[in-house]
Image (cartoon, rainbow, N blue to C red):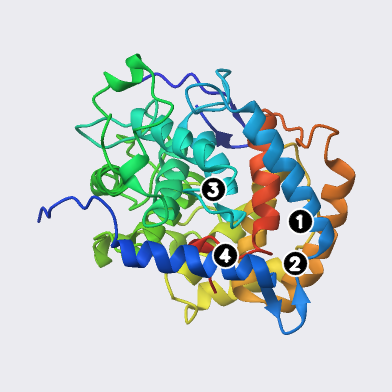
């Protein structure tokens, strides 16, 4: 399928088992109870270190912007930079705040975003979006983070138009959509000689940026209880290991290519090694060390993409380094937030706002993918 999405700085949006309907109600109740307790006590990163006031202020203003700018179909715009991937990032931003996703102030926005993402999924191959694996990866990650916390019973009840009700996706649960999304990612990887992913699900080449979006989504799905074969994860990790230089820099495409000096790619590699529980790897130690010495505030027009991964990678690998870096990010975001609560970006305000807030979401630690 022809990709209509704009690419810039190498970033582009453009054994069967019964499908579960949801996790147990008890599990969901416990998660909601823990979230409410954490909000009351202000979640702590370390003993006596609460979420900074500036973080909460920035986040609350950004959430209000996302809530008011969400379209009637549950997505965030119709320009070249919108789509299910951006909707997934916005959905994760809503979930990361710790507000009750079923009865809190943004519950209707959460359900609308989920309906939008699920409606964009192909019911046969499970791929989400216009044949673009960036969209699929971020949307799959959002489904994994919503699975077990959002009650499927009311997902399709409220805010549904007659046109939406007629879609084949109507009634599909979060768990069903997530399993279909995993199927798409695994099918795409099986036909890829590098063990990674590229823009198209049928691509025969790979790059470490697109692969990061998909692999983090798969790891989140596995953590959520969805069956993901170990060999698929190991094959993807092997691709990253072979793309990592001795200095911790990570190449962009192929295997054994010349490493670059991208903080984004080294952050992605650090994150996938950590979430996959492979901190024993030499490559993990190298990429983390690279990030410890490369904590610049970004060097191109797609800085928010770099910061999104840097926040998670440093938090996973070196809490002291993350705390220093996080303080710099707070100052940057205080200065950069617009009067309406948004953040500007070449990829649109919904993308810029969600990515910027997700940088700060590590302070809250409500998303399962952010657990250390």
Q: Tell me whether circle 1 and circle 4 mark residues in contact (CB < 8 Å).
A: no
Label 2: element kind: loop
Label 4: element kind: helix
Q: Percent x, y for residue 303? A: 72, 44
Left or right: 251 with respect to 54?
Answer: left
Q: Tell me whether circle 1 and circle 2 mark residues in contact (CB < 8 Å).
A: yes
Tag 1 residue: 56
Q: Nearer the viewer, residue 297 or 335?
A: 335
Q: Percent x, y for residue 64? A: 70, 38
**Mark 2 burial class by Cα count in 10 Å: few <14, some 14-19, many 20+:** some
**How many angstroms separate mark 3 from mark 2 (CA)?**
18 Å
Left or right: 213 with respect to 366?
Answer: left
Observer-side mark, 1 or 4, equals 4
Tag 2 residue: 51
Q: Which residue is at 57% across, 24% downward?
A: 6
Q: Earlier in the sequence, mark 4 or mark 2?
A: 4
Please say if 357 is above or below 229. above
């Amino acid at each position: 399928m022809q990709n209509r999405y704009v690419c810039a700085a190498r970033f582009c949006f453009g054994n069967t088992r019964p499908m579960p309907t949801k996790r147990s109600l008890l599990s969901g109740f416990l998660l909601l109870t823990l979230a409410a307790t954490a909000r009351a006590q202000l979640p702590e990163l370390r003993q006596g270190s609460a979420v900074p006031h500036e973080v909460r202020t920035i986040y609350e203003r950004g959430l209000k912007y996302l809530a008011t700018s969400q379209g009637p179909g549950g997505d965030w715009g119709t320009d070249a930079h919108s789509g299910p991937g951006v909707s997934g990032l916005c959905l994760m931003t809503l979930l990361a705040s710790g507000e009750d996703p079923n009865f809190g102030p943004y519950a209707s926005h959460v359900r609308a975003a989920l309906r939008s993402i699920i409606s964009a999924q192909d019911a046969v191959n499970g791929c989400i979006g216009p044949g673009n694996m960036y969209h699929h990866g971020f949307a799959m990650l959002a489904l994994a983070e919503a699975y077990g916390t959002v009650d499927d019973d009311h997902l399709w009840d409220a805010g549904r138009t007659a046109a939406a009700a007629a879609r084949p996706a109507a009634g599909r649960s979060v768990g069903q959509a997530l399993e279909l999304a995993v199927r798409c990612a695994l099918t795409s990887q099986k036909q890829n000689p590098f063990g990674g992913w590229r823009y198209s699900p049928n691509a025969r080449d790979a790059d470490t940026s697109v692969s990061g979006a998909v692999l983090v989504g798969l790891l989140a799905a596995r953590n959520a209880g969805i069956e993901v074969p170990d060999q698929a994860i190991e094959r993807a990790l092997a691709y990253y290991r072979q793309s990592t230089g001795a200095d911790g820099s990570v190449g962009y495409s192929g295997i054994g290519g010349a490493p670059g000096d991208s903080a984004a790619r080294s952050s992605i590699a650090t994150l996938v090694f950590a979430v996959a529980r492979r901190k024993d790897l030499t490559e993990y130690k190298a990429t983390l060390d690279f990030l410890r010495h490369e904590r610049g505030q970004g060097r191109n027009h797609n800085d928010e993409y770099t910061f999104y991964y840097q926040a998670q990678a440093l938090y996973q690998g070196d809490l002291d380094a993350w705390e220093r870096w996080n303080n710099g990010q707070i100052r940057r975001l205080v200065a950069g937030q617009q009067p309406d609560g948004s953040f500007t970006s070449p990829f649109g305000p919904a993308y810029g706002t969600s990515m910027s807030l997700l940088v700060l979401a590590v302070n809250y630690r409500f998303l399962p993918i952010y657990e250390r």
